Image (cartoon, rainbow, N blue to C red):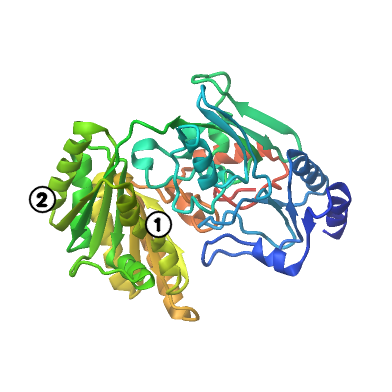
Amino acid sequence: MDDVVEELIAALPEGCVDTDPETLERCSHDDAEWADYALPAAVVFATSTQDVVQTMRIAAAHGAPVVPRGAGTGLSGGANAMSGCLVLSLERMDAIVRVDVDERYAVVQAGVLNDDLRRHVAEVGLWYPPDPASQSISTIGGNVATNAGGICCVKYGVTRDYVLGLTAVLADGRVATVGRTTAKGVTGYDLTGLLVGSEGTLGVVVEATLRLLPLGGREERAIVGYFGSLPAAGRAVAAVSAAGIIPSALELIDRTCLDAVAQWQGWQLPEGAQALLLSKVDEPGARGEELAQRIEDIFLEAGGAQVERATDPDEIARLFAARRLAYPALERLGPVLTEDVCVPRAAVPEMLARIERAAADEGVVIANIAHAGDGNLHPLIIAPEGDDDAKRRAKRAFDRIVEDCRALGGTVTGEHGVGLLKLPGAAEELSPVVLDLHAAIKRAFDPRGILNPGKAFPNGA
């Protein structure tokens, strides 16, 4: 790969190609614990579409594998390097190119942080809804690559629902612009939808055109319920869904997570609370108050020991802070193996019960956070550093949770992507015919198999 690196250094602006060992280590993996990775030959920090074009042309000429990378906040190993590959970072491509207020869309480069976009468009009265827990540090390009969801996706949808168009550099260096800026359009195949969630295996997304919503007209009300058991909280989730209520958020946090956050932040928790449900509605006026009251009643009927209400924005933010802090709080306790299963909403109570049984049977600590309103559960399996036996038991629990999810009619990944960690589960979920279709699409976009090889679907080139 030395000749490839030398050619890149000669072709790209000064400072774009980095081979410093510290940089190689930092950019060789994402946040997925236990996913394999190796050091790349170089990291290319693209500053323009032309830099990406040049990189892909040189890589294609040599058959060199390329791993696209955003901020490295992924949780499935999708941005992990293999030995001697090129890591292509988009983090320096962070311009908000244009915001069209009248047509309500924004054009942004791949390296723009989710939170930065949200703040920018809020200044002109617009809103970008997808809000992954990593929104302050994850990039739009990474969100597109994994079709990221977030807290409000139960009502407002995931990244794919807001991507109108994309500009991507293909494996041979050609630039493809797909999609539209109009409210409707069905010309040709939906290549935009195909690229969203493809984890960098079909093209390198350099720019996205994103649909925006009006910021005003919403009145947020938070309803927080404390439950004596995890299954009771699950039953409340199922009851909200059965009642036909679509909250703007419905999040679950179990006692293990609550304790970790409380110890870190110095908070006091209600005695006996084993699970917390955080719900929001954002309908204005009397309708919003009616829905908030119905959810409060459902929480109490399902066994909620205590229910709080809030309408003040600062108070709502305080209540929901526990959800956003849960993952980093748990990381302080040891390496975290993160699940991302999604089951039918009615199956949430049973899935939570099965997770508890897996933890007990394998003798491991499993914390639970969840986008419970759409059945997307994130069991977090903690194993002490250096304890190989605990690691083996954690892996057995991980595999068992995936099997239970599928047995309940679920899918092995709701929003984190397949990456490396979910390849065995995806192999079970996707039929041979569907896998053949995946392989054919991969060959059409990337005949030599150089874009993020081995990721996103089993037996991928």
Q: Quadrant of residue 72?
A: bottom right
Work out whether residue 37 or residue 389 is closer to the camera in this orientation and state it.
Answer: 37
Numbered label attached to residue 345 = none
Q: Amino acid at mark 1?
A: Arg
From the top left corner, tell me how far across and down residue 216 is, in percent: 38, 32
Q: Which circle's residue, 1 or 2, is located before the other in the chain?
A: 2
Q: Quadrant of residue 289?
A: top left
Task: Evaluate whether residue 371 shows in this view.
Answer: no
Graded by Cα atoms within 10 Å as few (under 14), some (14 to 19) or many (20 or more), the crowding at tag 2 reads some
From the top left corner, tell me how far across and down residue 80 is, in percent: 62, 58
Classify mark 2: helix, strand or loop: helix
Pointer 1 with pointer 2, Cβ within 8 A: no
Q: Amino acid at mark 2?
A: Glu
How many discs appear?
Answer: 2
Name the residue tied to disc 2. Answer: 301
Graded by Cα atoms within 10 Å as few (under 14), some (14 to 19) or many (20 or more), the crowding at tag 1 reads some
Name the residue tied to disc 1. Answer: 324
Q: Quadrant of residue 225?
A: bottom left
| Residue 290 shown left or right of residue 162 in the figure | left
From the top left corner, tell me how far across and down residue 403 is, in percent: 37, 56
Work out whether residue 452 or residue 79 is closer to the camera in this orientation and state it.
Answer: 79
Classify mark 1: helix, strand or loop: helix
From the top left corner, tell me how far across and down residue 118 is, in percent: 49, 41
